Image: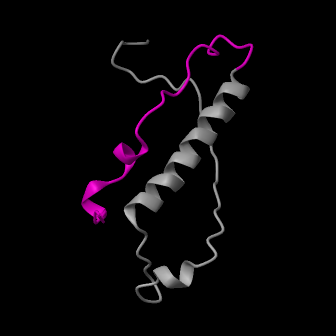
Amino acid sequence: MYRKKDPILLVELETETVFLVHNIDELKVDEEHIDIPEPFLTTLLSLTYSTIRGILIERLKETKLEKFVLPVIDPSTLLPSENIEKTE
């Protein structure tokens, strides 16, 4: 029996995004950590989110869900602020 509070999975999409960063060694803190500047991380996240939006729009074409798209957002709101050191 369905109740309004029960979540319903309407769409599931799994993606993998890979970026080639030529000067990644300059960002290394040690062998296990890198220090990615927040503006750069936001740019990478923005590219990833926009790509996922486009994939969903294409995959949901001609379905009952085609009018439901991920909203345009400020990608920095997706970053976990407790793990990010803001740079100026």
- The location of residue 18, given as percent across then percent down, is 65, 61
Q: Is residue 77 left or right of residue 10?
A: left
Which region shows up in magenta?
61-88
Which is more toward the observer, 40 or 56?
40
* Residue at x 72% of width, y 18% of height: 61
| 79 part of magenta stretch | yes
Query: For residue 65, which quarter of the picture?
Result: top right
Query: For residue 87, which quarter of the picture?
Result: bottom left
Q: Residue furthest left?
A: 82
* Residue at x 66% of width, y 26% of height: 57
Residue 31 against residue 40 in the figure, above or below: below
Residue 29 against residue 44 in the figure, above or below: below
> What color scheme is it?
one colour
- The location of residue 74, given as percent across then percent down, is 40, 39
Residue 17 against residue 75 in the figure, above or below: below
Which is more toward the observer, 26 or 66?
26
Which is more toward the observer, 33 or 39?
39
Quarter of the figure that contains the N terminus: top left
Magenta span dominant secondary structure: loop
| 1 part of magenta stretch | no
Q: Residue furthest front?
A: 88
Query: For residue 10, which quarter of the picture?
Result: top right
Q: Is residue 73 left or right of residue 9?
A: left
* Residue at x 45% of width, y 59% of height: 41
Numbered circles on residues, count: 0
- The location of residue 30, given as percent across then percent down, is 42, 89
- The location of residue 50, given as percent across then percent down, is 58, 39
* Residue at x 40% of width, y 85% of height: 29
Quarter of the figure that contains the C terminus: bottom left
